[in-house]
Amino acid sequence: MKQMIKIIRKVDIEKQYEHVLRLELDYELASLYVAMQDKDEKEMEKSKKRLKEIQDELDGLHAYV
């Protein structure tokens, strides 16, 4: 029984983390859009790097599903 509760909590935590990552993904996409509109190469690269990191984290979460 304790193991089941532990597993359920872990799944809940992972779902919450995925939700946070998706919110962060939306924010970075908006930041990238603004940087593209401003033609700010430095900010574009920064956003692209963070988007790649978020993608890798989401892929890692889904690898265990």
Image (cartoon, rainbow, N blue to C red):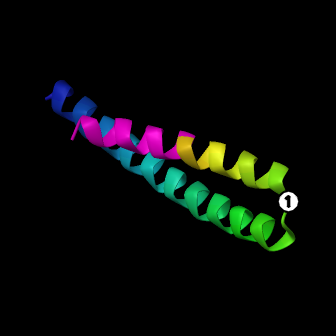
**Quarter of the image where the N terminus is located:** top left
Q: Magenta residues?
A: 53-65
The residue lying toward the viewer, choosing from 46 and 54, is 46
Give the image location of residue 43, x and y in percent. Answer: 81, 53
User: What is the crowding at mark 1: few (fewer than 14 residues within 10 Å), some, or many (at least 20)?
Assistant: few
Dividing the picture into quadrants, the one containing residue 65 is top left
Height in image: 61 above or below 32? above
- The prevailing secondary structure element of the residues shown in magenta is helix
Q: What residue is drawn where x is 40% and y is 41%?
A: 13
The residue lying toward the viewer, choosing from 7 and 42, is 42
Left or right relative to 43: residue 17: left
Q: Is residue 9 visible?
A: no
Give the image location of residue 40, x and y in percent. Answer: 85, 59
Q: What residue is drawn where x is 47% and y is 46%?
A: 55
User: Hey, what amino acid is under mark 1?
Assistant: Asp
The residue lying toward the viewer, choosing from 37 and 16, is 37
Q: What residue is drawn where x is 36% and y is 35%?
A: 60
Taking the view exactly as shown, the residue that stands out farthest to the top is 3
Residue that mark 1 sits on = 40
Left or right relative to 8: residue 28: right
